[in-house]
Image (cartoon, rainbow, N blue to C red):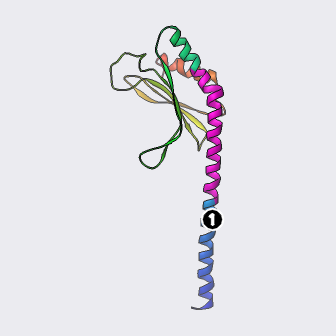
Amino acid sequence: MKPEITKQLQAILDSREQQKQAAATQASEAQREQAANLVDFAAKKAEVIRPAFQEILEMYQARTVPVRIEEQDERPNSKGGTESPTITLDLDELHSHYGTMKPEFKLTFDKRTRKLSLYTSTRSQAGPAGDVSLDAITGDWIHTAFLKYEGGKF
């Protein structure tokens, strides 16, 4: 092989190796960042989200209305990916038993974007109801969103 061809091929191979290393470094950094985001979510859930949900739960339970809080950590799914962590007010017993959907008020955390997505469902309709950044969520935001949900404003 001519020396100039050898140099050019080596340059190409070197470039590909550098790209692989850069991609591996970037993936590792993203994984560290996402792990830190999950830790931040756990803290925010304990300090803000769960207490706000608990206030709603206690108000409903004081009127003997069954409501419960369900939490799911990040977990693998059947397709080889992961399910995002969630915290949900399960209102299944609160609403009358018709329709096929389960009434709920659920926050799902996206560890890549640090966003919480609100999903609501009643027995007759369901869908996304807004997003909020992890750093911006407050008990007031949760209570206001829940008021809209219960008032049929979503």
The percent position of residue 106, horizontal first and vertical second, equals: 50, 28
Residue 25 sits above or below residue 34 on the image: below
Q: What is the crowding at mark 1: few (fewer than 14 residues within 10 Å), some, or many (at least 20)?
A: few
Whether the magenta-drawn stretch holds residue 110 is answered as: no
Count of numbered circles in the view: 1
Image quadrant in which the N terminus is located: bottom right
28 left or right of 89?
A: right
Farthest bottom residue in view:
2
The percent position of residue 28, horizontal first and vertical second, equals: 63, 55
Question: Magenta segment, principal secondary structure?
Answer: helix
Farthest top residue in view:
63
125 left or right of 49?
A: left
Whether the magenta-drawn stretch holds residue 28 is answered as: yes
Which residue range is magenta in the image?
25-53
Q: Disc 1 marks which amino acid?
A: Gln
Q: Residue at (50%, 41%) from the top-left corner?
A: 75
The percent position of residue 24, horizontal first and vertical second, equals: 61, 60
Residue 50 sits above or below residue 83 on the image: above
The percent position of residue 127, horizontal first and vertical second, equals: 44, 30
Residue carrying label 1? 21
108 left or right of 22?
A: left
Q: Secondary structure at mark 1?
A: helix
The residue nearer to you, when weighing 120 against 61, is: 61
Residue 67 sits above or below residue 23 on the image: above
Q: Residue at (62%, 72%) from the top-left corner?
A: 15
Residue 112 figure quarter? top right
Q: Residue at (63%, 22%) from the top-left corner?
A: 139
Residue 102 figure quarter? top left
Residue 141 figure quarter? top right
Q: Residue at (62%, 51%) from the top-left corner?
A: 30
